[in-house]
Image (tube, rainbow, N blue to C red):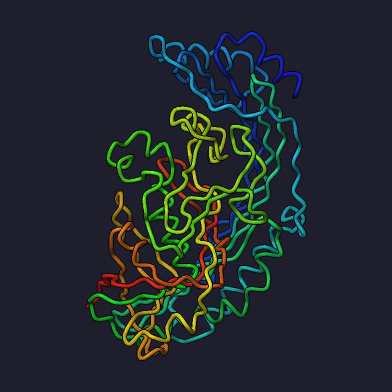
Amino acid sequence: MRNLIEDALRSHGADYVDIRIEDTTRTKISLRGRSTDELSVSRSTGGCVRALAGGGWGFVSFNDIVNLKAHVELAVSQARLVSEANGDSLLAPVEPVIDTVVPTPAVDPRSISLAAKQALLQEYSQIMLGASPKIQTTTVRYRDTYSKKIFASSEGAFIEQEQCDVGTGCIAIAREGDNVQQMFIVAGGVDGYQSVEGQHDRARECARRAALNLDAAPVKAGQYTVVLDPALAGTFVHEAFGHLSESDHIYENDTLRDMMVLGKQFGSPILDITDGAAVPGHRGSYRYDDEGTPASLTPLIREGVLVGRLHSRETAGKMGELPTGNARAINYRFRPIVRMTNTYIENGSTTFEEMISDIDEGIYAIDAYGGETAMEMFTFSAMEAFMIRKGRIAERVRNVVLTGNVFETLMHIDAVGNDLAMNDGGTGGCGRGQQYPLQVSDGSPHIRIRNVVVGGN
């Protein structure tokens, strides 16, 4: 294979060419209630070529790897067709690497039979269904992916990299008349199959909380001091801020470029935000990105000040900055674009008890069903929430929807916890454009935010 690739990269006639070859095996299982909806194992093998000539890119994806040289020639001819007159091919320099990366999962998911994986999910489903007579149905999903990738470039890089990713998610849906409530848990990671085992107690608790939420009163709409748990705070920093840090957005959007000015104060001195695949052991971790750039840790906010953003080699070259190893594609059918990896708020020094102690009336919001972002505006729905009264966690409430401007909200963070937790689980990932799901992680300690607009009844 290496000889075939290196031969295809000779005498290409472009400013730059790279090749990715991938071989991926996936297992997917889905249960709804006591029935199995999906039970599948699939394998895909293919590759792609990118060529850069005169500032224009050509891209070709394929399954017939034998005709690699012809694919290179086609990509180069495409690049010439779209090249700009006297255009500059700007790629930030990266030292070409020759390396092999092999994971060492404690329990390789490929060593576990499909029947054993299905049986584990059935256990979780049965536990949730039996936790309360108010549980109407459940959904349990599992997936594992094992991929082998080869990256080679005309600059001399040749990287063989294998990756293992495992995840499961359990959803319990409780119903009482027209009142329907749901809770979920996730588990997984890159360290092996054991990361999805032993979730029985968590599954039971998930169902119990869904049933309890049926009796929760809808929250009264208003403006509150809100404490976010690490899961919801991690979702917030990923969705509301992380996407704004992807520099191809910034480079292509004048409005966003005016917002995301390095050196601008975005929060109080207690706020630090980081992204990086060099954090070991998480779903967004890897040694090299899909351009062969080594993984790094990228400070985005330090002491409340915007100090960095995420780059591919092209965006770094065009913006006069350093590449950060964030060029990623979900598979060989897509070109790499700038994507997050592991995005998180760094630890502060406040304990949870200290954080809530001086709140006369506020809200403790836990995890997120999801949310929407539009530039700097966001909306998130909390999965679970409690009132905070006179410094203590009080009654359960529901229908808690958090809305605001991300820059104003970052300025209103006045306490950061000391209990950073990363969210690695689940069967999904980050979506952008047509590229979904991409493996990422996010995280945060507990954080306290003043003056949050909360929608409810």
Q: Nearer the viewer, residue 113 or 222?
A: 222
The percent position of residue 242, horizontal first and vertical second, equals: 44, 51
User: Seen in the image, is 184 located left or right of residue 287?
Assistant: left
User: Seen in the image, is 56 located left or right of residue 258?
Assistant: right
Residue at image point 39% right, 71% down: 414
How many numbered circles does the render carry?
0
Residue at image point 40% right, 75% down: 227
The percent position of residue 53, horizontal first and vertical second, equals: 49, 14
* The quadrant where residue 452 appears: bottom left
- Quarter of the picture containing the N terminus is top right
Residue at image point 62% right, 37% down: 44
Q: Nearer the viewer, residue 336 or 299?
A: 299
Question: Is residue 120 placed above or below 253 in the rendered structure?
Answer: below
Question: Is residue 228 placed above or below 70 in the rendered structure?
Answer: below
* The quadrant where residue 180 appears: bottom left
Q: Nearer the viewer, residue 244 or 4?
A: 244
Question: Is residue 353 placed above or below 240 in the rendered structure?
Answer: below
- Quarter of the picture containing the C terminus is bottom left
The percent position of residue 2, horizontal first and vertical second, equals: 75, 23
